[in-house]
Image (tube, rainbow, N blue to C red):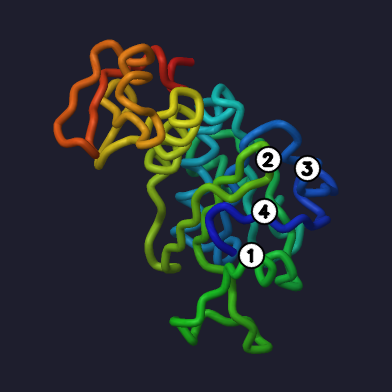
Amino acid sequence: LRLGSIAPNFKADTTNGPIDFHEFIGDKWVVLFSHPEDYTPVCTTELGAFAKLEPEFTQRGVKLIGLSANTIDSHRGWIKDIDELSGSKLAFPIIGDKERKVAFAYDMLDYQDTTNVDQKGIAFTIRSVFIIDPKKTIRLILSYPASTGRNTAEVLRVVDSLQTGDRHRVTTPINWIPGDDVIVHPSVKNDEAKQLFPEFRIVKPYLRFTPLPKEMTSAAV
């Protein structure tokens, strides 16, 4: 899978019932993220963090959906621990992928850590993240080792960058957060930029900044 490719469709059982993934996406953005195993320490902290931040994603028109190579019954029991430990109320679905079918389709497998396998020697899923837009296009792919928890704020920041860029024909520089200056997209010529961004400034012919208040970004919710 590559950025810009269509996210593979699949049918699966989840903790919220069966889904057809493309139908689940509908006209929303989706963050699909996998975990190595239920009832593991790092994963537990991650699910709690995503659950707490879910309202922020929802306000941006983004659905969350998790995946772990375990059964639905295992997931449901694990959710009780997650809610207890994080003080959250996890509501988004978690895919049951005991046969690793979705994991294989999305290449969510760990080939570095040979100990990260089940009793049959099949690799568990790693910490993969996919941001998918309403056109079912993959816009971001992140892969973390099983030992390292993700940064949920970074996932949300990328959502803001992508949605804001699509809306305003801009890109975002290093360490950008909503409210910081953005970069005028290379496809926007200077004459048009003057109309779209009256305060834009040319640093180099290929690097043009413009203010973009937080109220004009997808974070203005």
- The residue sitting at 66% across, 39% down in the picture is 92
Q: Is residue 96 toward the left or the right of residue 60 in the image?
A: right
Amino acid type, label 1 = Tyr
Q: Which mark is residue 219?
A: none
N-terminal of the pair, mark 3 or mark 1, is 3
Disc 2 target residue: 135
Q: Is residue 132 toward the left or the right of residue 181 in the image?
A: right
Q: Nearer the viewer, mark 3 or mark 2?
A: 2
Q: CA distance from mark 4 to mark 3?
A: 24 Å
| Depth check, front residue: 69 or 170 | 170
N-terminal of the pair, mark 1 or mark 2, is 1
Amino acid type, label 2 = Lys
Question: SS for tag 3?
Answer: loop
Amino acid type, label 4 = Ile
Q: How many marks are shown on the rendered structure?
A: 4
Q: Nearer the viewer, mark 4 or mark 1?
A: 4
Residue 155 at what x, y percent from top left?
44, 43
| Crowding at mark 1 (Cα within 10 Å: few <14, some 14-19, many 20+) | some
Badges 3 and 1: C-beta atoms under 8 Å apart?
no
- The residue sitting at 14% across, 31% down in the picture is 203
Disc 1 target residue: 106
